[in-house]
Amino acid sequence: MSVLKQMMDIQSPSRNNPIEVIVGEKQPCRCCSGNGFFWGRDEFGDGIKKTCPLCKGTKYVQPEIAITWKPVNNK
């Protein structure tokens, strides 16, 4: 099975912006195998669909990475 891999090249900012946010490409949710739900049981033992806690039923997730730049402490 093929796997999509994404890479980042991190470079210090050219402007006075100490925080930057990078958003990656959407990917199928591996928690629910891209279904958006799990099969569970209700209080009567009947089968019910439970929404995936990670993708919230959307079937996809998207990484959001926050980078905070700070000066080096030369001691």
Image (cartoon, grey):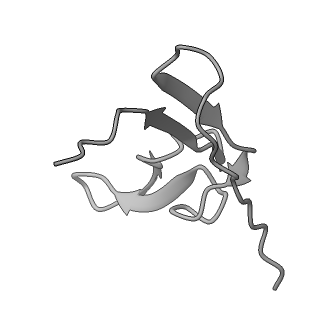
**Residue 62: x and y, percent?**
63, 42
Between 73 and 19, the residue placed more toward the observer is 73
Which residue occupies the extreme bottom position in the image?
A: 1
Closest to the observer: 52 or 15?
Answer: 15
Residue 1 in which image quadrant: bottom right
Residue pushed farthest right? 2
Relative image position of residue 70 (x, y in whole percent): 36, 32
The residue positioned farthest toward the top in the image shown? 16
- Report how many numbered discs are placed on residues in the image: 0
Kindly indicate the quadrant of the structure image that contains residue 29. bottom right
Vertical arrangement, residue 62 with respect to residue 7, above or below: above
Would you say 11 lies left or right of 1 here? left
**Is 22 left or right of 6, judged from the image as shown?**
left
* Residue beneath the point at 53% across and 14% down: 16
> Which residue is more in the foreground, 38 or 13?
13
Outermost residue, left direction? 75
Residue 47, given in percent of the width and then of the height, sits at 43, 60
In this rendering, the answer to whether 64 lies above or below 10 is above
Q: Residue at x 48, y 59 (%)?
A: 38
Q: Where 36 sits versus 47, above or below?
A: above
In the visual, does 57 lie left or right of 34? left
Residue at horizontal 22 percent and vertical 52 percent from the top: 43
Residue under the point 66% across and 47% down: 59
Residue 21 appears at what percent x and percent y? Answer: 56, 29
